[in-house]
Image (cartoon, grey):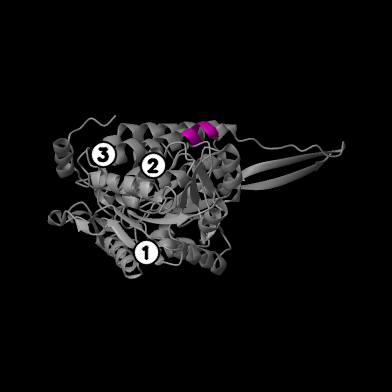
């Protein structure tokens, strides 16, 4: 439970000493090369100078991971021993939870309450889940002819390159790293240049937990340089990426131009949230819609940014969301009472504001928000924003905004709702509110999305897979299915 006050978090922030060095082969590697400033969106202050890695640093990290995989103990440990190492790492994440939550809050603007209660809880639980799963992954022995024995073994795929975004810097890193390590792979992790500091701490804690050198390496730098170098590297066997669809295309090209490495992509979203007139609780549906779009400053690939609501209840639902937007406490991320913090930086804030300006110019009606706030802080804050009278062809309804901006569209019947919901290049998630069980089943099957929430949103745990359809990507994070991305199936046929 989060117990520190605003003043106590401020005091800890002033004392926090953050290091921005790569973590390669079990040690920090300054490299002596160029650096860049990690700037907090909370107030514009520099948190640390971070090593700006390039091809040389990626080469060193991949070489360390290759040695650790080809000749080191990690892939050859009993699965239970790998599991125990991951559980030790989970314990260290729990022990350093305050420091890690503070780092996340400072580097990407997330409210400290969310960083502590949601981000760090997810990271800890992820390493615990895969630590406990490591020795429960079984091979197969199919029934064959009586004079033969067939074995199907699941073997670690090799060196994994994991490139992760800034919106959930530890959660998403954990979703990639933990199952890869549980499978026996070694990993080179590249965090976003906007949120490198928490990932570096993860790498150091992995070494402290007893993971052998080279098993988890962290290289900082930007996507076009460090990310590209990982994507093109011939000694990277698997690439796992979460980010934009545009960058996901680059990684597919990198694989084609190098060693045809497997590429697993979790990409953008423009998720529909359908509210039918028979929703079991319209007020709850509206409150959940508001929470879904404004949580994490709307910087979520699954954010229900397209609210599809039946015309008969549209104004009632929209008014409730507008009312909730006006009640939200936008403020200092280090204040435990803050409900919506800062967007990740000025450049991203500018992109979101451009979407808002375009929405107004295209004829959508701005119901609330639409402007930056708390400008005296030096931070990148935006008021929660709601548009209605949005039409399917508008940019607001088509493009991922990745900010606290809701577009309300209306429909007259169920077929129209499903057609509107599927009228997008994305297919990551969707929501549906109805009291009719048959409708819930039929519509959830008809929606082209990797996850469909019925009478809720953003619910679930590590037992269920997460990923997208269409241009939202392929493969799945979370659950036992995630391990499949980091293993190869080998068939051995023994003639008796």
Give the position of the C terminus as an image quadrant.
top right
Q: Which residue bears the numbered disc 3?
A: 99
Camera-side residue of 7 and 25: 7
Residue 362: image x %, image y %?
36, 69
Please give the residue where the numbered disc 2 appears in the rendered image: 288
Percent x, y for residue 486?
Answer: 56, 48
**Secondary element at image label 3:** helix
Q: Position of residue 349 (x, y in %)?
A: 27, 60
The picture quadrant where one finds residue 396 is: bottom left
- The 10 Å Cα crowd at callout 3, few under 14, some 14 to 19, many 20 or more, is some
Q: Seen in the image, is 2 located left or right of residue 400?
A: left
Q: Residue 42 in the image: x percent, y percent?
A: 20, 51
Residue 37 drawn above or below residue 310: below
**3D distance between C-alphas at marks 3 and 1:** 28 Å
Task: Name the image quarter holding residue 229.
Answer: bottom left
Q: Is residue 47 visible?
A: yes
Residue nearest the observer in this picture, 251 or 91: 251
* Number of residues whose C-alpha sits closer than 10 Å to that of mark 1, classed few (under 14), some (14–19) or many (20 or more): many
The answer to whether residue 411 is left or right of residue 95 is right
**Gap in angstroms between the C-alphas marked 2 and 3:** 30 Å
Q: Count up the numbered dots.
A: 3
Question: Magenta region, mostly helix, strand or loop?
Answer: helix
Task: Say what secondary structure mark 2 lies in.
Answer: helix
Q: Earlier in the sequence, mark 3 or mark 1?
A: 1
Name the residue beneath numbered marker 1.
Answer: 54
Label 1 residue SS: loop
Q: Residue at x 37, y 31 (%)?
A: 91
């Amino acid at each position: 439970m989060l117990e520190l006050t605003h003043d106590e978090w401020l005091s800890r922030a002033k004392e926090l000493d953050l290091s921005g060095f790569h973590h390669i082969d079990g040690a920090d590697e300054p490299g002596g090369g160029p650096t860049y400033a990690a700037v907090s969106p909370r107030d514009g202050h520099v948190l640390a100078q971070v090593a700006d890695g390039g091809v040389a640093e990626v080469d060193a990290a991949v070489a360390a991971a290759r040695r650790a995989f080809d000749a080191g103990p990690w892939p050859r440990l009993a699965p239970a021993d790998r599991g125990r190492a991951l559980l030790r790492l989970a314990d260290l994440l729990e022990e350093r939870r305050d420091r890690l939550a503070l780092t996340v809050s400072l580097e990407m603007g997330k409210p400290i309450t969310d960083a502590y209660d949601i981000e760090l809880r997810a990271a800890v639980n992820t390493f615990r889940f895969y630590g406990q799963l490591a020795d429960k992954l079984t091979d197969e022995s199919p029934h064959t002819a009586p004079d033969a024995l067939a074995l199907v073994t699941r073997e670690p795929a090799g060196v994994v390159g994991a490139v992760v975004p800034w919106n959930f810097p530890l959660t998403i890193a954990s979703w990639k790293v933990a199952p890869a390590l549980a499978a026996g792979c070694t990993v080179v992790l590249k965090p976003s240049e906007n949120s490198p500091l928490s990932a570096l701490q993860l790498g150091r804690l992995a070494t402290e937990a007893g993971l052998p050198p080279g098993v988890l390496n962290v290289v900082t730098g930007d996507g076009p340089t460090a990310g590209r170098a990982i994507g093109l590297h011939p000694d990277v066997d698997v690439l796992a990426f979460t980010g934009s669809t545009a960058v996901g295309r680059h990684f597919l090209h990198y694989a084609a131009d190098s060693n045809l490495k497997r590429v697993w992509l979790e990409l953008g979203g423009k998720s529909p949230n359908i509210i039918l007139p028979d929703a079991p609780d319209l007020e709850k549906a509206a409150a959940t819609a508001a929470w879904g779009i404004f949580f994490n400053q709307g910087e979520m690939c699954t954010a229900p940014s397209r609210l599809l609501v039946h015309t008969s209840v549209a104004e009632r639902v929209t008014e409730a969301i507008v009312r909730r937007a006006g009640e939200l406490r936008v403020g200092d991320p280090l204040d435990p009472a803050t409900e919506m913090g800062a967007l990740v930086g000025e450049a991203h804030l500018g992109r979101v504001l451009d979407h808002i300006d375009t929405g107004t110019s295209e004829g959508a009606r701005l119901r609330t928000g639409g402007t930056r706030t708390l400008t005296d802080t030096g931070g990148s804050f935006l008021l929660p924003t709601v548009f209605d009278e949005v039409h399917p062809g508008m940019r607001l309804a088509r493009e991922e905004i990745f900010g606290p901006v809701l577009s309300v569209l209306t429909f007259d019947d169920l077929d129209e709702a499903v057609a509107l919901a599927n009228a997008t290049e994305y297919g990551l998630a969707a929501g549906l509110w109805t009291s009719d069980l048959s409708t819930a089943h039929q519509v959830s099957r008809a929606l082209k999305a990797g996850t469909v929430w019925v009478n809720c949103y953003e619910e679930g745990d590590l037992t269920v897979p997460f990923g997208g359809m269409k241009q939202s990507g392929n493969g799945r994070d979370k659950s036992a299915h995630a391990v499949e991305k980091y293993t190869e199936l080998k068939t051995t046929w023994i003639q008796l």
